[in-house]
Amino acid sequence: MLKAEKICKSFGNNTVLSDFSHEFKSGAVTAVLGKSGCGKSTLLDILMGIQQPDSGNVMRGSERLSALFQENRLCENLTASSNIRLVTGKRISKPQIAAELAEVGLEGAENSPARTLSGGMKRRVALLRALLAEYDILFLDEPFKGLDEDTKRLVMNYCKEKISGKTTVFVTHNEDECEFLADEVVRM
């Protein structure tokens, strides 16, 4: 269960959320759509408990959370595989991780340190780390940014398969991403 009630958040004189309320459906993919700077990422941070609202409440049980942030937040000296193993432990084997990397076009990158990867490669590693973690609610902040069109299509198909039937909230400013992935769209 994930529910926001009358969430308000300001930074100085800049109000980014004003009486935002929404009940996110369990097992559904919800897109939060809006222009840059309208408070989408702030909303995700509040839903995850990273930031506190100025007023209002978030109701979230004791669910396990997984997240992909706007920044990739990889450990630059660890390999792509090791970055993913930070959340999977031994639950997913190294060959399985290599297979997952290959599915998003990163075949052979499993032993490459994150610092040597391009921005788009890092984004896919960070996305896999979020998708392969054990979670009840998944938060994705602009998951496909920095990807060329062919790679984006590949990764979106992979992502759609992985999140089907799972409670997911993703932030985007792209209508096509909403249409392809979302069961419901919240416009900000």
Image: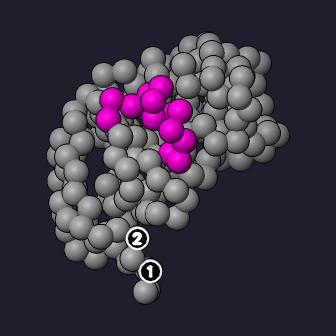
Look at 34% across and 61% down and name the residue there: 46
Residue 30 location (% of width, % of height): 34, 38
Residue 128 location (% of width, % of height): 55, 30
Residue 151 location (% of width, % of height): 70, 25
- Which residue has dot 2 on it? 16
Q: Residues in magenta?
A: 172-184
Q: Residues within 10 Å of mark 2 (few under 14, many from 20)?
A: some
Q: Secondary structure at mark 2?
A: strand
Please determine whether, in this image, residue 137 is positioned above or below residue 50. above
- Which residue has dot 1 on it? 14
Q: Are marks 2 and 1 in contact (CB under 8 Å)?
A: yes
**Please, what is the three-letter code of the amino acid marked with disc 2?**
Val
Please determine whether, in this image, residue 138 is positioned above or below residue 73. above
Please determine whether, in this image, residue 106 is positioned above or below residue 72. above
Report if residue 180 lies within the magenta region.
yes
Look at 63% across and 23% down and name the residue there: 153
